Image (tube, rainbow, N blue to C red):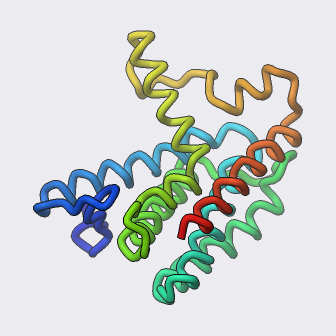
Amino acid sequence: ILAWIGGIRILGVAGHSFSGDVESLLFTVLWIVTCTNAINLIDGVDGLAAGVSLFASITMLIAALLNHNFAMALAVVPLAGSLLGFLRFNFTPASIFLGDSGSLTLGFLLGCFGAVWAEKSATLLGLTAPLMVLAVPLLDVGLAVVRRLVRGQPIFVADDDHIHHKLLSRGLTPRHLLFVIYGICAVGSAASLLLM
């Protein structure tokens, strides 16, 4: 809510502008909370959350520069730089970890940057580009919520059925898993930039 008060606002979806502040507030809070939890839930393998966040932040930096949104570019550069330095020590086998505070902060920042990107985007599709760049963690959180509802579990109860768990159970090593998901993130990043 404080981010919305501070000016981080989603003003419409798919070319439809919201008629009032209540819709904007609700959708912005939903977007930021979803992104925050998406990065937290995907943080189950060394280097996964940091790597996915690095792809997203570099893509948002490029998008900001292409849109001549230099204020957003200046905000994203420290995040991308710190993730690059952090990933060196967080890549499997990791010697440092994000923890919940780190992954929740990353998700919050990426959610805010995605909202600003959608607001300043030249495309009518608005949130489509941020959705594409954050596709892996957003898909994972969406599947987790649906899976837990179908099973009759509270949505906040942990399980080991996330995308990374499924890939590990199929025989991928943590390092190979990272490269597969990084590849998917690279495709999503390229597609979101091409959409612009």
Quadrant housing the N terminus: bottom left
**Residue 83: image location, x then y, percent:** 69, 66
Residue drawn at (27%, 52%) of the image: 27
52 lies above or below 174: below
Residue drawn at (55%, 48%) of the image: 39
Residue drawn at (56%, 35%) of the image: 140
**Residue 62: image location, x then y, percent:** 62, 77
Q: Is residue 167 left or right of residue 59?
A: right
- Of residues 96 and 149, which is closer to you in this image? 149
181 lies above or below 188: above
Q: Residue furthest top?
A: 151
**Residue 93: image location, x then y, percent:** 87, 46
62 lies above or below 42: below
Residue 173 found in image quarter: top right
**Residue 74: image location, x then y, percent:** 54, 86
- Of residues 172 and 94, which is closer to you in this image? 172
Q: Is residue 193 left or right of residue 30?
A: right
Residue 111 found in image quarter: bottom left
Q: How many marks?
A: 0
- Of residues 190 and 88, which is closer to you in this image? 190
Residue drawn at (39%, 10%) of the image: 152
